[in-house]
Amino acid sequence: MPKNLERWYPIIFGLALTVLYCSFFRSKPLPSSLKDIFGAATTLSSITIGFLGAAISILFAISSTNVVKQMKNANNYTVLINYLMDAFNWSFLLLSLSLLGLFVEIKTFGSWQWLAFGIWLFTLLTCGLSSYRVIRVFAAILRATN
């Protein structure tokens, strides 16, 4: 995948899918099970944060391998760290917004409820795509070690 596309696709696709969802479903009421959805997102983002922490630990543990040395020489190591931190940040933002959604009734926002839900949905999608990007890069590293 080209570097620019790899760098920006979580945000671009997250935004595009959010705009599509809001365009098609804005006239419909928000799901009645929002609290359950926010609860599931809280769990999901917590697991993602744990996974990313483990990934950073693994990366630290294999830092003396030839593959990581080659990545450092090619300046790809910094890119991987940046991807990890992006996914970490999006996961923490998703966790924060989901926890907020558990305590604040979003349906009381009136006409602004779709904006609030759209921001949360964008964060969910971008978090998922950022995490997937990290998994893809780690898979490439694992393939290169063979």
Image (spheres, rainbow, N blue to C red):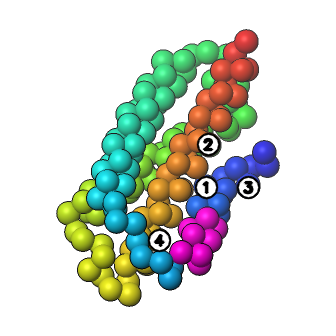
Check disc 1: other Cα within 10 Å, few if <14, some if 14-19, many if 20+.
many
Mark nearer the viewer, 3 or 1: 1
Find residue 101 and report its horizontal and vertical position in percent: 29, 63
Residue 76, position in %: x, y? 67, 37
Residue depicted at 43% across the width and 32% down the height: 51
Q: Which residue is mark 2?
A: 133
Which region is colored magenta?
Answer: 16-25
Comes first in the chain, label 2 or label 1: 1
**Viewer-proximal residue among 62 and 138:** 138
First reached walking from the N terminus: tag 1 or tag 4:
1
Q: Considering depth in this image, is 16 or 93 the residue closer to the camera?
A: 16
Spatial separation of the CA atoms under disc 3 and disc 1: 11 Å
Q: Sequence order check: which comes first, mark 3 or mark 4?
A: 3
Residue on which disc 1 sits: 10
> Can you tell which quarter of the image residue 54 is in?
top left
Name the N-terminal-most of marks 3 and 1: 3
Q: Residue drawn 74% across and 49% down? A: 3
Residue at numbered disc 3? 4
Task: Tell which residue pokes out farthest to the left in this image.
Answer: 103
Name the spot of residue 92 as percent of width and height, x first. 36, 51
For the N terminus, give its image quadrant.
top right
Q: Residue furthest right?
A: 2
Q: Find out whether the residues at labels 2 and 1 contact each other: C-beta distance under 8 Å.
A: yes
Which element type, helix, strand or loop, lies under badge 2? helix
* Alpha-carbon span between mark 4 and mark 2: 22 Å
Label 2 and label 3: CA atoms lie apart by 13 Å
